[in-house]
Amino acid sequence: MNRVQAVYEIGDIIELNCIGCLKRIELSRAHNNNYSYIDGHCNKVCPVGKQLQELGKKLVRDST
């Protein structure tokens, strides 16, 4: 998978899973849109967030 494909796949996943996520909306309301709380949940607990992290790693260029 190349970088462009990864970007499109990330966009599709976010559109299908994250836009209407009830947990994300609940955390947003509870913490006044403080995204560190929302991202913490998405990165550590949510399986979709973990999938997004794996795709994001494909966007990082090798620094070697």
Image: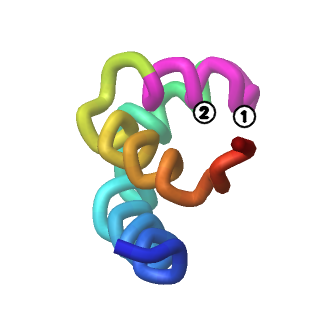
Farthest residue, direction front = 64
Front-most of residues 56 and 15: 56
Front-most of residues 30 and 60: 60
Q: Position of residue 48 (x, y in %)?
A: 29, 43
Circle 1 residue: 33
Q: Secondary structure at mark 2?
A: helix
39 up-or-down from 11: above or below: above
Q: Position of residue 27 (x, y in %)?
A: 53, 26
14 up-or-down from 47: above or below: below
Q: Position of residue 19 (x, y in %)?
A: 44, 60
Q: Secondary structure at mark 1?
A: loop
Mark 1 residue type: Asn
Callout 1 environment at 10 Å: few (<14), some (14 to 19), or many (20+)? some
For residue 13, side relative to residue 43 (left or right): left
17 up-or-down from 5: above or below: above
5 up-or-down from 45: above or below: below
Callout 2 environment at 10 Å: few (<14), some (14 to 19), or many (20+)? some
Circle 2 residue: 28
Task: Place residue 35 in its image quadrant.
Answer: top right
Mark 2 residue type: Ser
Q: Which residues are magenta?
A: 31-43
